[in-house]
Image: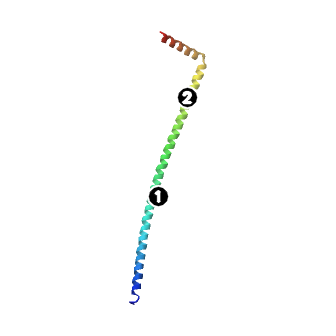
């Protein structure tokens, strides 16, 4: 038995080392899984914030486009109204009188 004692000690030491390393590996693997889950959750939060930011920017751009369209329509409507008003003889006569009266006041 003494002849095999060094081999038995070596095998037992190897077995203990193997079991300890397996336990350590399992522990390390669990830590890595938890860290991975935390990293994924963090990335999801970042993605959600970026998505919300892009949605807000998109809404803002749509509002700007809508305001520009409204302004363009208002300008076109005003121009049309002035053009149509200038076609009326009574309006042209009032403008002529206003210009004549204005020029008379400047000369006095």
Q: Residue at x 51, y 42 (%)?
A: 59
Q: Nearer the viewer, residue 93 or 102?
A: 102
Decide which of 32, 59 is in the foreground and name it.
32
Identify the residue position indicated by label 1 in the image: 40
Q: Secondary structure at mark 2?
A: helix
Label 2 Cα crowd, 10 Å radius (few <14 / some 14-19 / many 20+) = few
Q: CA distance from mark 1 to mark 2?
A: 52 Å
Q: Position of residue 23 (x, y in %)?
A: 41, 72
Compared to 101, does 65 lie above or below? Answer: below
Task: From this view, report whether residue 97 is shown above or below residue 3.
Answer: above
Q: Which residue is mark 2?
A: 75
Residue contact between numbered discs 1 and 2, judged by CB atoms under 8 Å = no
Percent position (x, y) of residue 5?
Answer: 39, 87
Q: Position of residue 77 (x, y in %)?
A: 57, 27
Residue placed at 57% from the left, 24% from the top?
A: 81
Image quadrant assignment for residue 12: bottom left
Q: Residue 76 at x, y = what percent? A: 57, 28
Q: Is residue 32 found left or right of 70 in the rendered image?
A: left
Q: Quadrant of the N terminus?
A: bottom left
Picture quadrant where residue 16 is located: bottom left
User: Is 94 placed left or right of 21 in the picture?
Assistant: right
Residue at point 53% right, 36% down? 66
Q: Nearer the viewer, residue 9 or 39?
A: 9
């Amino acid at each position: 038995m003494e002849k095999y004692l060094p081999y038995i000690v070596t095998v037992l030491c190897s077995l203990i080392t193997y079991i300890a390393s397996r336990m350590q590996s399992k522990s390390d693997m669990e830590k890595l899984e938890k860290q991975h889950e935390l990293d994924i959750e963090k990335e999801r939060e970042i993605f959600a914030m970026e998505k919300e930011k892009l949605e807000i920017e998109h809404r803002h751009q749509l509002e700007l486009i809508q305001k520009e369209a409204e302004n363009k329509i208002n300008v076109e409507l005003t121009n049309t109204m002035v053009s149509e008003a200038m076609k009326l003889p009574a309006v042209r006569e009032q403008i002529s009188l206003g210009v004549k009266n204005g020029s008379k006041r400047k000369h006095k």
